[in-house]
Amino acid sequence: MKKVQTLEQIQKLNETELRTYLTEKTQAMFAEYGVDNLDDIGCYVLLEAEEMFDFDVKAMEFVEVLEFENETYLHGAKILSDSYGEDFFCQLRWYNVNRNSKSCTVRKIFF
C-alpha cells in the first residue's frame, strides 16, 4: 500500500496511465478547492493487485473500474469527513479465457 499526497509523488509513479490520470485529477482539485497540496482534502491510496482484499467496497462512497489502454484499476472513494477523503486505486490484472462464446469475452482477475 502506498499513500500519495503530492504532485511530486504522483510524478514518480511507474504506472504511466495512472500517473497521467492522477496528475490531471489533482490539478483540477487544486483549482476547484483553491489549494496547492492534498494535505487538507485527501490522498490517493494505491494498492498492489495482491492487496485487493484490502479494498473495502462497503466503506466506499462509490466504486468504479478505470480502464485505460494498458492498465485497469478498481477505484473507490472513501469519505472520512466533510472535507477529507481517500481515493483508492487497485490495479487489476486480467487474463482472457476462451469459452468458445462469440458473444462474450470472459476476463478473470488474478491475484
Image: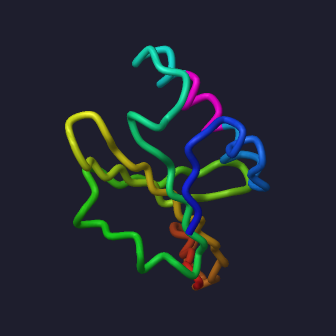
- Residue at figure coordinates x 42%, y 80% from the top left: 53
Would you say 74 lies left or right of 61 here?
A: right
Q: Which residues are magenta?
A: 21-27
- Measured as percent of width and height from the top left, residue 18 is found at 66, 47
Decide which of 54, 71 is in the foreground and name it.
54
Would you say 96 lies left or right of 76 here?
A: right
- Residue at figure coordinates x 40%, y 19% from the top left: 33
Residue 11, quarter of the rendered image: top right
Please tell me whether residue 25 belongs to the stretch shown in magenta. Answer: yes
Would you say 10 lies left or right of 49 here?
A: right
From the viewer's perspective, is residue 39 above or below residue 74? above
Quarter of the rendering occupied by the C terminus: bottom right
Q: Count every numbered label the image shows and give the total.
A: 0
Would you say 20 lies left or right of 29 here?
A: right
Please tell me whether residue 11 belongs to the stretch shown in magenta. Answer: no
The secondary structure that dominates the magenta segment is helix
- Measured as percent of width and height from the top left, residue 84 is found at 31, 40
Quarter of the rendering occupied by the N terminus: bottom right
